[in-house]
Image (spheres, grey):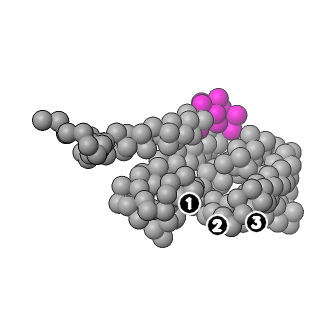
Amino acid sequence: MAPWIIFSVLVGPGRFELSVCLALATSLVLVIAGRVTRRGSSWKILEVSDLVFFSVMAVIGALVGPGTHRWLETYAGEVSNIALFLVAFGSMAVRMPFTIQYAREQVEPGLWDSPVFLRTNYMITGAWGLAFLVAAVAGAYGDLVLRDPDNLWTGWVIQVAALIAAVRFTNWYPDVVRARARREHPAAPPPGRPGPG
């Protein structure tokens, strides 16, 4: 998420090119570092989305006139949040929630097709998608209704709270699933020891 965070924090009047270039450079560095540190790892949906989105934004920013450029500076935050929302729900629509590619690197392959593992990743990806949607709606409300892109609540508090909620959910939900699995399927007693009687 680093490229998107950099873009969101920096974008604004007079800073569109800088924010896009830094986000694109960060995307490239992260992709290259990922390939070097995890040889043979697969391309991630989010990595490809980063590269495509910021490359397209850089090209558009270089080619458009001043009016469109001002529009991009004003609404780029909403555009990026809508793009992330589409990545999240689009990845679920093609049955590859974007979080699953990261989760597979942390669990043994025998669990990859487990219904619980799949459902957990759909829930986490959905939580991120909803957070991006909330951020987009809050930003649009500040820009279009309040006519105040720098509004503390719609420009920062609500958007950051939505992302923090997604991070917290991502950390919390797998523990809930594991605890539920332990309750429903308690471990068998070790060999040689009698079970509860």
Label 2 residue SS:
loop
Classify mark 3: residues with Cα within 10 Å, few (<14), some (14-19) or many (20+).
some
Q: Amino acid at mark 2?
A: Ser
Spatial CA distance of label 3 from label 2 is 23 Å
Classify mark 1: residues with Cα within 10 Å, few (<14), some (14-19) or many (20+).
some
Instruction: Report the side of 164 relative to 76 (left or right).
Output: left
Return the residue found at the far front: 192
- Residue 56 disc label: 3
Task: For the residues labelled 2 and 1, say whether their Cβ atoms are less than 8 Å apart.
Answer: yes
The percent coordinates of residue 105 (x first, y second) are 57, 56
Of tags 3 and 1, the one toward the viewer is 1
Return the residue found at the far left: 197
- Residue 101 disc label: 1
Q: Is residue 2 visible?
A: yes
Instruction: Report the side of 99 relative to 13 (left or right).
Output: left
Q: Which residues are magenta?
A: 148-159
- Residue 23 disc label: none
The percent coordinates of residue 83 (x first, y second) are 61, 58
Spatial CA distance of label 2 from label 1 is 8 Å
Of tags 3 and 2, the one toward the viewer is 2
Residue located at (86% from left, 49% from top): 18
Task: For the residues labelled 3 and 2, say whether their Cβ atoms are less than 8 Å apart.
Answer: no
Q: Identify the residue position indicated by label 2 in the image.
A: 42
The majority secondary structure of the magenta stretch comes to helix
Q: Quadrant of residue 55?
A: bottom right
Residue located at (28% from left, 46% from top): 191
Residue located at (64% from left, 66% from top): 42
